[in-house]
Image (cartoon, helix red, strand yellow):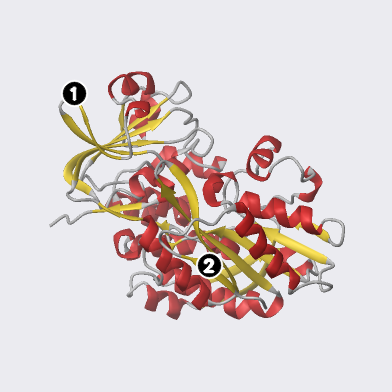
Amino acid sequence: MKKITDGAKERIISSADLEAHIDNFLASHEGKLDRLLLLPPDHTRLNSRAGEITAYIYNKLKDTCTINIMPALGTHFPMTEEQCHMMFGTSIPMEAYMPHDWRNALIELGEIPASRIKELSEGKLDFTMQVAVNKELIEGNYDLVLSIGQIVPHEVIGMANYTKNVMIGIGGGDTINKSHYLGAVYGMERIMGETNSPVRAVLNEGFDKYVRPKTNTQFILTVIGKEDEDLVMRGVYFGDDDETFAEACELSRAVNLDNVSKPIQKCVVYLDPEEFNSTWLGNKSIYRTRKAMANGGELIVLAPDLHTFGEDPEIDRLIRKYGYLGTDQTLKDVEENEELANNLSAAAHLIHGTSDARFNITYCPGKDVTQEEIESVGYKYMSYADAIKKYNYKEMKDGWNTIDGEEIFYISNPALGLWQADLG
């Protein structure tokens, strides 16, 4: 295959540069592609540039081969037509998209043995993990499967993308649930920002044993950073191996890890309505700041378009029922309630979404979520209208601000970094 690496901390890769790299990559497949499957992220990774890459490849090859696009939804809601157009533009016909059904459209390929899960969890877990992916990946007879996405610090696996985009993005419930729970039990703080983790190991092993031999899957990995107030592409990597992924991770750590000078006493995070509509997604505000929040500090989450907790009706119900009440309570609830034990990704999310009383979390939703709903899941409440009177995101810059004599750390998009401080 054609391996391409282009990235540096101060590099800015233009659209023309990116298209030249894609052309170079596709040239190595010229005359070999009759059927192509593209696996980009959904609109919740709007800033990944994967939409631009997907649209360029589609329009470049649509007249010479059959192209299907399966957004790597995981357990997220299928994308609407409006969201597809926002992410990928309007040139791709809707019939090219294939939604992933993580409950029903699967093929089971094998399993990771309980002994391996026990080893990776340091003895805390003892179960097998099924390896299943969308059956289209295996049965669609594709000459090339192209996974496209962004490398960025991630709460579940350490660094997002690569095999995760396949094993979770178009994976089955057992893989999703148990890998998420493995990460939660192992400890988020030990994982975030690390290339290698127990979750990465188990997904790589499942991919290498069961998916790689059955498909020609290759990866386009982007690294996105900030240049003043703009988002720019710092790196793009084409490859199919762990070394390419590791190289992209090194750049992402240089670009996306934010070391703050001191623990944050008050942090305000804004959730863009085009990207964050649920606490399932919006809790990146918690995941990505927890290593920087001071003991006893306050995290204020401005969530103007929050309208649900889970991205799936059943997970939404479980979040509402069990709440973000702390790791010990969630572990107890898993032991005592079969419905939660059977949905371990929800349990992992509940652990991820709590500060375990180390700092306070105040959610500030718009009109679609009530004070009663917010407080019922364990968070403090302030209305969005009241919050922006005091913490107007339009008047703050990313980083340290002083508002009415109070020092505030502001983050305009929690998905783009991982903030950490020496907590002593």
389 and 367: which one is in front?
389
Q: Which mark is residue 383?
A: none
Residue 85: x and y in percent read 69, 39
Q: Is residue 103 visible?
A: no
Label 2: which secondary element:
strand
Q: Is residue 142 visible?
A: yes
- Tag 1: residue type? Asp
- Tag 2: residue type? Asp
Q: Are marks 2 and 1 in contact (CB under 8 Å)?
A: no
Mark 2 or mark 1: name the one nearer the start of the chain: 2
319 and 87: which one is in front?
87
- Which quarter of the rendering shows the N terminus? bottom right
User: Residue at position x 18%, y 23% from top?
Assistant: 404
Lateral position of residue 293 relative to residue 114, left or right: left
Label 1: which secondary element:
loop
User: Residue at position x 16%, y 54% from top?
Assistant: 423
User: Residue at position x 67%, y 45% from top?
Assistant: 88
User: Residue at position x 67%, y 71% from top?
Assistant: 217
- Residue 9 vs 349, above or below: the answer is below
92 and 369: which one is in front?
92
Residue 366: x and y in percent read 44, 23
**Residue neighbourhood size for the residue with mark 1, other residues' Cα within 10 Å, grouped as few (<14), some (14–19), many (≥20):** few
> Dot 2 corresponds to which residue?
6
- Which quarter of the rendering shows the C terminus? bottom left
Residue 107: x and y in percent read 69, 66
- Residue 218 vs 213, above or below: the answer is above
Residue 388: x and y in percent read 34, 23
**Residue neighbourhood size for the residue with mark 2, other residues' Cα within 10 Å, grouped as few (<14), some (14–19), many (≥20):** some
Marks 2 and 1: which is nearer the front? 2
Q: Residue furthest left?
A: 424
Q: How many labels sit on residues?
A: 2
> Dot 1 corresponds to which residue?
404
